[in-house]
Amino acid sequence: MAQTATFRNVYDAVIVGSGAGGGMAAKILTEGGLNVALLEAGPPVNPEKDYKMMVWPYELPHRGVGVGGHQNEFQAPNGAWEITGEPYTNAPGSKFDWFRSRIVGGRTNHWGRIALRFSPIDFKSYTRDGLGTDWPISYEDLSPYYDKVEGYIGVFGTREGISSAPDGVFLPPPKPRCTELIVKKACDRLNILCVPARLAILTQSVNGRLPCHYCGQCGRGCVTASNFSSSQVLIPPAMATGKLTMITGAMAREILVGADGKATGVVYVDKATKTENRIGAKAVVVAASACESARLLLNSKSSLFPDGLGNSSGVVGRYLMDSTGSAGSGYFPQLEKMPAHNHDGVGGMHLYIPWWKFDRQNDFPRGYHIELGGGRDMPGVGMFDRLCDREEGYGADLKARARKSYGTTISFAGRGEMIPNPDSYCEIDPNVVDQWGIPVLRFHFKWSDYELRQAKDMQETFRSIVEAAGGTYMTKTSIDGDLPYGIAAGGRIIHEVGTVRMGSDPKKSVLNAYCQSHDVKNLFVTDGAPLVTNPDKNPTLTIMALSWRASEYLLDQAKKGNLS
């Protein structure tokens, strides 16, 4: 039988999750006139209180490294690999590390703000090489929404005409720093593309937000909202409409359906009181993050949907992807002579290396880009920590060696495309529940030879750039073991997508081209779950573009009475 429920309040739409996809849906739907409730599992965020942008190490307990050194207190709050009382499991022989955020704005509070468009070929890559599946939409379908998102949130960059990295609506980029210029000169000698980065950080005022003041502490959260987060850029205008009801500390347990097979509302646990509540809706938008959204759908079982809501295809949880990641660093003796100076700029790279081997035959499919890092930064944040990992000893000798080597390394991080495979998916663990009694996810994950060969190529490229620049490559990787060529464990790049994929065939996909359920027409998913492939671009910009497009479609369907 279908579920029946009596609701105290029935909203035009209920959104689960307040991050990139949920925050965008809240903005578009409320500005379109709908009364919306938003459920967020974490607490509110108060930038003035919660962000540590201008805090010195001595002002925090344990100099900001956390109790036992396990959690960096400098970072934006409430994002973690492990959450007390909220476990997840790995199947035997698998390892997947799941980063979750429990705070208004979700992982946009922790995002590196790298904002790259997918390219035209990324939507039709199966047609090119026969691997995976083509998207049910094209670049031309999404391009107007990339324009809207970039214009609204503010993204810096330059127009370069690179086929693998489409141009966008850009603010002026910041000037390269000395470490980036070293890499740029080496790349020019090697005929490797190296261009201004594209980050969602303001270099000019946009919609009343102040431009970046170059403190370089984006990872701590930005009190001036100069870098993008849903909590500061998307949620406030939605609240200003008077049509958004924000419910924090609300852990979604299940989506309810009526006898007609449509979603009727959401059951959630009030974490403060540990009581169960129900909220009614004419439409439900799930945007809890790719894996959390799959978990919610799989746990929403009924006589109409015994395998989980909207899962007649059996695809929910399948096609889990993360970005291929491998990293390295080089030592550059010329930087020892560089006088100590302010590395003015944003808390991220000013230059990056887009995929440049698109015009040749490689021994792996698809591609990767390279992110750059270097210079001096605040103790407890990045480069200084890694220096302390390298140098040993104490006293005057340690200080002298630290001063000599501090700021002399440049880091490289490859981010590449994973081909979806049948061995990588998430499912409900039949034996484990969280502290709220909700069954948890069990992960299966495996890199294929495609990704391993890609990581190998990354390492070879890092070395060639370092040596061309007169440096010494410092990273040692093994071709053996569980993680050869320095490839990161699944989930560690925090780009997991693809568990509730869109497609044209309801037998092989969960959602249509507008992120609407094939099975339940008033159910939408607007986070990373709908993504069909996971190109070498960080997915957040695409998540927001898809959410904007889906939300406009939802508004149109609601006005036509097609959802009720």
Image (spheres, rainbow, N blue to C red):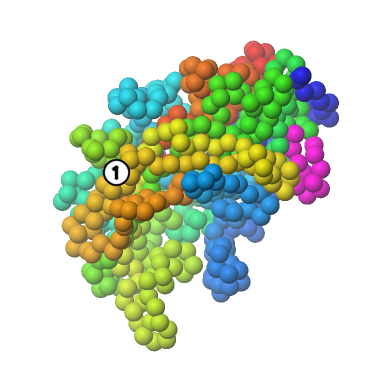
Question: Could you tell me residue 437's position as x and y percent?
Answer: 74, 43
Three-letter amino acid code at disc 1? Arg
Question: Could you tell me residue 506's position as x and y percent?
Answer: 53, 17
Quadrant in which the N terminus is drawn = top right
Residue at which label 1 appears? 453
Query: Residue 126 versus residue 482: which sits nearer the camera?
Result: 482
Position of 146 compared to 400: left or right? right
Can you name the residue that lies furthest to the front here? 92
| Number of marks in the rendered image | 1
Query: Residue 104 versus residue 434: which sits nearer the camera?
Result: 434
Residue stretch in magenta? 267-277
Magenta segment main secondary structure: strand
Q: Quadrant of residue 401?
A: bottom left
Q: Quadrant of residue 75?
A: bottom right
Query: Can you say whether 125 is above or below 354 in the image?
Result: above
Residue at image location 23% in from the left, 37% down from the top:
362
Is residue 239 on the magenta stretch? no
